[in-house]
Image (tube, rainbow, N blue to C red):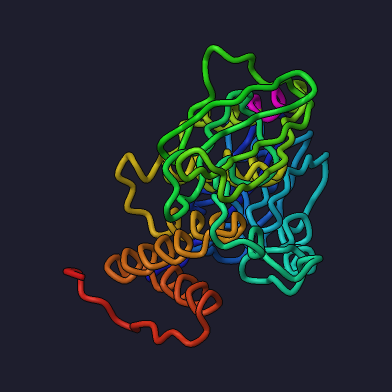
Amino acid sequence: MLKFKRFITIVSGVTIIPFLNWNGAWSRTQPLVTMGSCIRPIGRIIYLGRSSQICKDEQINIANNAMLICYLSKKIVTLHAGVYKTNSVCNSLQTDTVQRCTLITPETCPNRKGPNEDNENAPKIVQPYGKIVINNRPLISWIAVPGATSYIVQVKSHYVNWVKQVNGTSLSYPPEQEKLHYGSAFKIVVIANKGDSPISADTLVVHLLPEREVTQINQTVQQVASLGLPPDEVLLDLDTIYMSQGLLNKAIETLQGQIEKGSQDPALYRILGDRYVDAWLPQEAVNAYKKALELATVQGKKDEQVIAQARLRLLNPQSQLPTRMNAAQ
């Protein structure tokens, strides 16, 4: 079998995305040869309305500014004219990852405890996921409290203050209430009631990004959307864009939306599991990783299978995970 080398060159205002090396003599500019190819891309470079995913151990030659979306470090990088090694511009920033306070690394948390561990019967606020949002009318949801007959939801900021009673465990932002103001912090309080008496409560402080930053993020998303990429593939870019700004809520909602459309991509479920880990939702993370493992096994995607197994062991070191799965499982 013939093996072809990948090329990535951006010259004279034109983006040339990876192609097969038939003769290499058609371009006036000598392209930079990159060695081999890869199964798992580490980022995407976008230039003048075109794009190419990049892999480890490649070189990029650009004539003018280009945008680079780095999947590993969750960073958006602007590249100026020059030659770059993909490993140096899209490094994994492992030190920062280890230091993050997550469900898998609770020892790095300042108080050594996860959210709401002091009161297991509190109506733990689930949504918004994380503490930064771009939607000024976010959905609010929480975990049910045994014995609770209703809940009181209060949203309060410098500009907004309203209270609503709810029988279920979720609340769409009331349309009759003033929307949240960009660039402000707001507090969500959920109180569980048994009859007329409160029995427990949970509080979450969330920050709504300034409108200028929200506009910039939406423009970047539109730029990626205009590339016409396959829906499952573009989700890796959108996840990076949102997580580069700490927008866990938007990242999870976007991934969930694609799953609701019937996606069977194991990488999508694996990334969703990672986001649930960030949101301190262990059962949701386990379910997502198990689905990723099932799909990866059936589809023969060994790399995703290995990652899903490793994630599950991190959540439950004593678990004995299957090494093989039947398609009917």
Residue 327 in picture, x, y percent from top left: 20, 69
Quarter occupied by the C terminus: bottom left
Q: Is residue 209 toward the left or the right of residue 247 in the image? A: right
Residue with the most extreme left position: 328
Q: Is residue 4 above or below residue 310?
A: above
Number of labelled discs?
Answer: 0
State the image coordinates of residue 164 (x, y, percent, origin top left). Answer: 54, 26
- For this rendering, which residue is in front, 130 or 42? 130
Compared with 324, 208 (above or below) is above
Residue 149 visible? The answer is yes
Residue 298 versus residue 173: which sits nearer the camera? 173
Nearer to the camera, 190 or 197: 197
* Position of the N terminus by quadrant: bottom left
Is 123 located above or below residue 108 in the figure?
above
Quadrant in the rendering for residue 140: top right
| Residue at the image position 54 percent from the left and 58 percent from the top | 121
- Residue 242 shown in magenta: no
Rendered image quadrant of residue 36: bottom right
Residue 320 at what x, y percent from top left? Answer: 40, 87
Q: Residue at x 69, y 70 (%)?
A: 106
* First to last magenta residue range: 214-219
Tell me what residue is drawn at x 42 percent, y 53 percent.
Answer: 147
Query: Residue placed at 64% from the left, 14% from the top?
Result: 178
Q: Is residue 216 magenta?
A: yes
**Is residue 237 shown to the viewer in this render?**
no
